[in-house]
Image: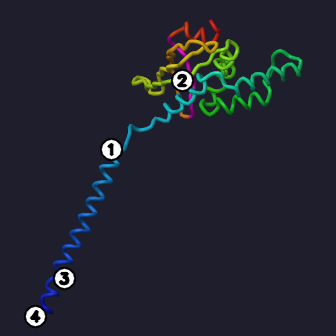
Amino acid sequence: MSHNSSWNRIPFVTKRISRGKIGVAISFVLMCLILGGCSQDEPHDKNKELIQAYLEYDLNTPNKGAIKAQNDLWKWFEEQKQESGPLSKEYNAYLKDNYGPYFSESGYDQLVSRGQTLVFHLAADKYDYQTTVSKIDIEQSKDTPTNYYFTVNIDYIKNGKDKINAEITGIAILRPDGIEQITYLGDKKMLRMLIMGE
């Protein structure tokens, strides 16, 4: 009789093990769904990341590499005995390496031809001030999805003295291959102070 009773118990044990495996599998799937659903932040907007990276580069001033590139350019002009003309290959390479990754090809060409590169870095060096980006907010336009409005909060310190908190606003127009145009708007007095040391 004992022989029959052990065979009768095996299906019960097998069913119990199967139910346990199914329970563990369901629990695992539910945990994955819960953790996956909770950990998803809002989708990353590559355009916002690109704009933020550029603004951090342009407005954390002065940048020693930018100052060195400009000084090397002036030295090169002196050696060439000219006041203007085509830029040196090294300077062009510096601009391409530091601005090219952010801009579309046509946007980069416009930026360079208008002399809008290194403006804040050179002014910070000339007028002895330092700016540090503390916060950047970027919002995509609902009406024109290629336009992004930004607000940059910076800390401005002149001659190592009192810190001023300032806000710079602007708009960035994007194309599939990068920033086409970036324009600083808002507080004109602050922009003048950054560019002309006033």
Question: Would you say residue 114 is visible in this rendering?
Answer: no
Judge the density around disc 2: few (<14), some (14-19), many (≥20) Cα neighbours within 10 Å: many
Q: What residue is drawn where x is 46% and y is 35%?
A: 45
Q: Which residue is mark 3?
A: 10
Task: Give SS at disc 1.
Answer: helix
Mark number displayed over residue 179: none
Q: Which residues are magenta?
A: 177-186
Q: Which residue is mark 1?
A: 38
Q: Which residue is mark 2?
A: 133
**Number of callouts in the render?**
4
Image location (x, y in percent) of residue 173: 52, 24
Q: What residue is drawn where x is 30% and y is 57%?
A: 29
Task: Return the residue found at the far left.
Answer: 1
Mark 3 and mark 4 lie on one chain; the one further toward the N terminus is 4
State the separation of the CA atoms marked 2 and 1. Answer: 31 Å
Q: What residue is drawn where x is 19% and y is 75%?
A: 15
Image location (x, y in percent) of residue 84: 81, 16
Identify which amino acid the numbered label 2 is placed on. Answer: Val
Judge the density around disc 1: few (<14), some (14-19), many (≥20) Cα neighbours within 10 Å: few
- The answer to which image quadrant residue 61 occupies is top right
Task: Give SS at disc 3.
Answer: helix
The verdict on residue 181 being magenta is: yes
Name the residue nearer the viewer: 161 or 141: 161
Task: Return the residue found at the far front.
Answer: 161
Mark 1 and mark 4 lie on one chain; the one further toward the N terminus is 4
Q: Which residue is mark 4?
A: 1
Image location (x, y in percent) of residue 129: 63, 15
Most frequent secondary structure within the magenta stretch: strand
State the separation of the CA atoms marked 2 and 4. Answer: 85 Å
Name the residue nearer the viewer: 65 or 55: 65
Q: What residue is drawn where x is 54% and y is 23%?
A: 133
Q: Nearer the viewer, mark 3 or mark 4?
A: 4
